[in-house]
Image (cartoon, rainbow, N blue to C red):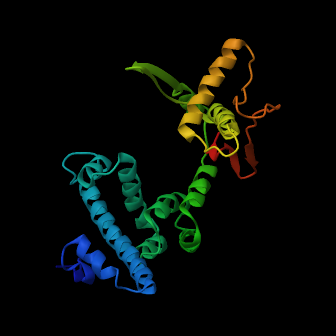
């Protein structure tokens, strides 16, 4: 089938069956497989850019079934709202970033990279970020976005108000869920990571699962509070030694302080 002059079906998938494609691909040498995969990634990105362009025009026309564009895209594509929001924001921003848009249309940038680049680049820095973005990992670009965010007292208050810890009984098990902001979250994470890492098994025995060790660490913290020790205990199987949790706050002249990559 042809759409806009491009073949939608790869030559090796004309049979229409994934298993048939596997049989064909298993006869290919590794170098050919790698080259084909690289080309498939580029084509996928090109088609994604075409879809974003279509979404941008539909967004301009308000032709999204009387729904918010992000909600409409999420429903149509069967993706999370956050995924749809990133794609809509990218589609709206690329109008003013032609060099980044061209790199994306050439299949040189992933959607994860684009989601950060449209927040970092301006029309004046468009070309520079198009070059830099190709070489940058999505996680590095996301950190750069976070570092240049200015966090207000109001936002910090909202984060603080969102803290929660809930527990309830389900059958014979106690269930827990929660969320902790900023330094509180970093502090609790540091304590739990230390305790979980200290739960070494006896020599020759396998490690228990991380989930089991996390549950044991939480119980130990509650037991320490009950006993009035006021300190994070070491696991029973670990060597007991003095330890104080530390939280590292990164300071910079061009950004607000961050904890675990989160501006505060």
Q: Position of residue 18 (x, y in %)?
A: 25, 71
Residue 116 versus residue 165: which sits nearer the camera? Answer: 165
Q: Position of residue 143 (x, y in %)?
A: 60, 54
State the residue lying farthest toward the front: 204
State the residue lying farthest toward the right: 242
Task: Give the answer, above or below, for where 158 lies relative to 261.
Answer: above
Task: Give the answer, above or below, for where 183 lies relative to 1.
Answer: above
Residue 169 versus residue 1: which sits nearer the camera? Answer: 169
Identify the residue at image location x=59%, y=29%. 216
On the picture, is 54 further left or further right than 40? left
Residue 225 versus residue 198: which sits nearer the camera? Answer: 198
Identify the residue at image location x=58%, y=67%. 136
Q: Choose top left, top right, bottom left or bottom right for residue 220.
A: top right
Q: Choose top left, top right, bottom left or bottom right for residue 19.
A: bottom left
Identify the residue at image location x=30%, y=75%. 22
Q: Quadrant of the N terminus?
A: bottom left
Q: Quadrant of the C terminus?
A: top right
Task: Give the answer, above or below, for where 226 lies relative to 190.
Answer: above
Q: Position of residue 36 (x, y in %)?
A: 39, 82
Q: Position of residue 116 (x, y in %)?
A: 51, 58
């Amino acid at each position: 089938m042809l759409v806009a002059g491009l073949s939608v079906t790869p030559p090796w998938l004309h049979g229409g069956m994934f298993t048939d494609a596997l049989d064909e691909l298993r006869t290919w040498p590794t170098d050919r497989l790698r080259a084909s995969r690289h080309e498939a990634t580029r084509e996928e990105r090109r088609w994604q850019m075409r879809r974003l362009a279509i979404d941008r025009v539909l967004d301009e026309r308000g032709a999204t079934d009387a729904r918010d564009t992000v909600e409409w895209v999420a429903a149509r594509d069967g993706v999370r709202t956050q995924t749809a929001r990133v794609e809509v924001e990218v589609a709206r921003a690329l109008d003013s970033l032609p060099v980044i848009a061209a790199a994306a249309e050439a299949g040189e940038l992933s959607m994860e990279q684009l989601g950060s680049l449209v927040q970092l680049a301006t029309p004046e820095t468009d070309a520079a970020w198009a070059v830099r973005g190709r070489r940058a990992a999505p996680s590095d670009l996301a950190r750069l976005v976070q570092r240049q965010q200015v966090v207000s007292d109001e936002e910090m208050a909202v984060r603080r108000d969102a803290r929660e810890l809930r527990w309830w009984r389900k059958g014979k098990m106690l269930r827990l869920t929660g969320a902790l902001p900023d330094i509180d979250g970093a502090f609790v994470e540091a304590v739990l990571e230390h305790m979980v890492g200290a739960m070494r098994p006896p020599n020759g025995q396998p490690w228990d699962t991380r989930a089991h060790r996390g549950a044991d660490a939480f119980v130990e913290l509650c037991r320490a509070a009950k006993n009035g020790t006021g300190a994070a205990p070491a696991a029973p199987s670990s060597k007991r030694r003095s330890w104080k949790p530390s939280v590292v706050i990164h300071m910079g002249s061009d950004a607000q302080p961050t904890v675990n990559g989160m501006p505060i």
